[in-house]
Amino acid sequence: MKMKELSNSKVPAIVFDKKLDKFRGKVLFPEKLEKANEILSKSGLPQVKK
């Protein structure tokens, strides 16, 4: 898409910084991830109505 087309559309244009690729696949907060997984295992995910 050209910039003019992007400015007319309702979808926001997002550009990701390539420096963030070094964090791909890494767990930055292992304690919080462990706690979240524990909570999800106890309660489960909510049912989605279609």
Image (cartoon, grey):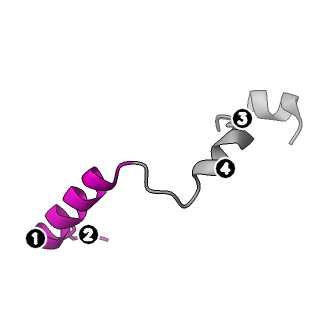
Q: Is residue 50 left or right of residue 27?
A: left
For label 3, count other residues whose C-alpha is less than 10 Å away and answer few (under 14), some (14-19) or many (20+). few
Please tell me which of labels 2 and 4 falls first in the chain.
4
Foreground residue, 4 or 30?
30
Foreground mark, 1 or 2?
1
Circles 2 and 3 in contact, beta carbons < 8 Å = no
Foreground label between 2 and 4: 4
- Residue indicated by mark 4: 21
Label tally: 4
Secondary structure at badge 4 equals helix
Camera-near label (4 vs 3) is 4
Above/below status of 19 relative to 46: above
Q: Which residue carries the number 1 mark? A: 42
Left or right, 46 with respect to 18, comes to left
Mark 2 is surrounded, within 10 Å at the Cα level, by few (under 14), some (14 to 19) or many (20 or more) other residues, namely few
Label 1 vs 2, first from the N-terminus: 1
* Residue type at tag 3: Ser
- Is residue 49 magenta-colored? yes
Question: Residue 28 location in percent, x, y?
Answer: 43, 49
- For the question of whether residue 16 can be seen, the reply is no
Mark 1 vs mark 3: which is more N-terminal?
Answer: 3
Q: Is residue 7 above or below residue 34?
A: above
Q: Which residue is labeled 2 in the image?
A: 49
Residue on which disc 3 sits: 9
Query: How many angstroms separate mark 4 from mark 1 (CA)?
Result: 33 Å
Q: Work out whether mark 2 precedes mark 3 in sequence or the reverse, and give the earlier one.
A: 3
Name the amino acid, label 2.
Lys
Q: Which residue does the image show at 15% across and 62% down from the upper left?
A: 39
| Nearest to N terminus: mark 4 or mark 3 | 3
